[in-house]
Image (spheres, helix red, strand yellow):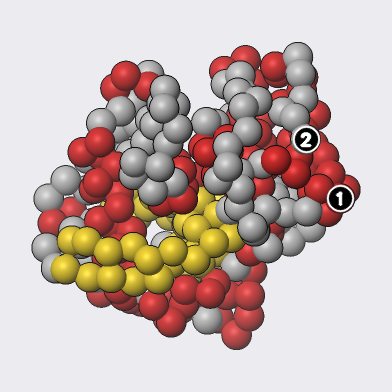
Amino acid sequence: MINKPKTAAEYSSRYVELVKRTCLYLATILGDFQDDLVIVGGLVPTLLIPEGSLPENEPAHVGTTDLDIGLHIALLNGQRYEGLTERIRRAGFENDVNDEGNVTRQRWINSKYGLSIKVDFLIQPINESEEGGKLRNIERDFAAVITPGLHLVFRDREKIILKGITIAGEMASREIWVCGPGAFLVLKALAFKFRGEMSLMPRPNIAVSSHISTNVLSAMEFSRSRWGAQSIRLLTCANGEIIGNIKTLNRIRSGRF
C-alpha cells in the first residue's frame, strides 16, 4: 500500500500512473453511474492538463497517490448506491484499514492486482449543520466524507476520455467526468482549512495562460456562492493577496494548487 508523501519531492510519476489505471478500471465497472460521479482531488490537474501542453518553465503538478471520487447526492434516492457498492465489491475492492487497525468505510483498496491505491468517496452536506470531514453513513460498510462545496463539481466539470491499461492489465477507453478548475480551487482551499493546514497553502502564481476553460463557474456565481466566497477569503488571508480576476481561472492556474 502506498502511503501519502510528506513532501513534493517524494511524489513519483509511477504513483500517478497507478492512480490513473485504478480510475480507468473503476470507469469500466461503473459506466452507467458516470453522471453521478466526478473525479476530484490530486488527480484532477493530471487529467485536465494534457502532457506537453504546459508553458515553458511551468512545473508539472506533483501528482497524487490516491483517488478521490465525488458522489452526487442523487445516489441516495431510491438506494441507487446499492448497485454501485455491489459492483466495487465484485471488482475486488474492500475497506481499507487505518494505522490503528480500524476499518475505514469511506476508503477502499484493491489488493487483487498488486500495489493498492486508496479510493476515497466524498459527498456534499445535506444541510449547513453537517460538519466537513465527518462521515455520511450510507451502508454498513460504506460511507462518504462530507465535503463542503462538493456540489459545485457537478456544475463545473469537464468530460474527458481516459484510455490506457487498467490495474487488471486490460486495455480500455472510457469517458469520465473531472472536476473543473473553478470548483477544484474552491475544494482545495476548503480542504486546507478543514485539515488545519492554512499555513501550508501554496502561494498562487498570477500568470494567465491561453488555456482558458469554457466550463469555469461564472465570476458572479462563484463569488456569490457560500463556498466560493469563503475560499477566496481563505486564499487571500493565507497569501496576502487575492488570486486575481476569478474570470481568468483556467486549468493550468488551478493546477498550481
Say left or right for 90 vs 122. Answer: left
Examine the image and state in which quarter residue 62 appears. Answer: top left
Q: Look at 43% across and 82% down and name the residue there.
A: 32
Q: Is residue 246 above or below residue 142?
A: above
| Quadrant of the rendering where the C terminus is positioned | top right
Q: Is residue 171 above or below residue 95?
A: below
Which one is nearer the viewer's eye here, 227 or 118?
227
Percent coordinates x, y for residue 55 in the rendering: 45, 32
What amino acid type is highlighted by mark number 2?
Asn
Q: What is the CA distance from the residue labelled 2 to the residue labelled 1?
A: 11 Å
Say left or right for 169 vs 233. Answer: left
Q: Element under label 2?
A: loop
Callout 1: few (<14), some (14-19), or many (20+) C-alpha neighbours within 10 Å? few
Q: Element under label 1?
A: helix
| Quadrant of the rendering where the N terminus is positioned | top left
On residue 220, the disc is 1
Which one is nearer the viewer's eye here, 203 or 186?
203
Which residue corresponds to mark 2? 245
Q: Is residue 199 above or below residue 137?
A: above
Q: Look at 77% across and 25% down and name the residue there.
A: 242
